[in-house]
Amino acid sequence: MSKKSLDDERKFCRQVYENWPFVRSIVELYAEGVSWKGCDKLDIGSIKSGVRDMLVNGVGQFNLETQGGIQVPMPQRFPFEGEEPGHPFLWPVTQNAGHLAEMQKLLVANVGAEQMFQMLKKDMCLGLGVPYELLGSLATVANGDAIMWGLITFMGNVKNWRDHLAYNLELTWNDTWLTSGLTAYGQAYQVFKAQGIDLRTLREESLSAAKSLLESKLLSRQTYEEWVKWF
């Protein structure tokens, strides 16, 4: 990994965010997830703006009516190694963006560059916690289990950052963000849908599984209705 100052990391990540739509999509998904259902001290738009800056610039600005503006840095990536907080979430995963730009220039003249181009994009997406196949207006993953596996890191990151903000801003979230169970995947489904991404296969297979459990009397009607409302 190349050595960069914290300021250089932030400038680089801002350029990556501005240049690559798939990176912006992932940042917006996280902003949607962290702000899910809102909290008691900030409106949802303010939460999203602050989270966006945390991920891209390493520090988010949150303006609370009672406390004024508070800056919250990204938590340490490696807390046991003495690393300072405030490194952008996008760094170091996107440091190959320069190579990605080079591959993009070669696409017209070199068909072989397409494979490397796609591989680099997918590698970045995995590093950021959202598989490339889950982006776009209709996610292309055909298997519901694969979608669930693909959402694990995303859901965990959202939970960690909600906890981080709750501690630093002394706020209370209006609802609990879960990271396991069908309800958790329903929450993630809603977040992606709010960003224009239809995880249709996840919805169809989740509803089918819940119905089978209900018909087999392995699930109560109350629990069934609680589950399916998320989809």
Image (tube, rainbow, N blue to C red):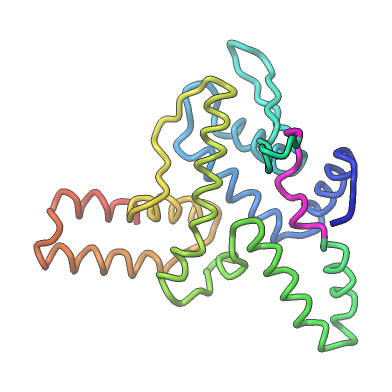
Q: Nearer the viewer, residue 31 or 94?
A: 94
Q: Which residues are magenta?
A: 84-95
Q: Which residue is depicted at the point 67% across and 37% down? A: 79
Residue 29 image offset from top left, x and y in percent:
58, 51
Residue 33 relative to residue 207: left or right: right
In this rendering, the answer to whether 209 lies above or below 56 is below
Residue 206 image offset from top left, x and y in percent:
32, 64
Q: Which residue is depicted at the point 39% across and 37% down? A: 176
Residue 170 image offset from top left, x and y in percent:
53, 20
Please give the count of numbered marks on the rendered protein. 0
Looking at the figure, which quarter contains the C terminus?
bottom left
Residue 52, magenta (yes or no): no
In this rendering, the answer to whether 38 lies above or below 219 is above
Residue 89, magenta (yes or no): yes
Q: Main secondary structure of the magenta part?
A: loop
Residue 28 image offset from top left, x and y in percent:
63, 49
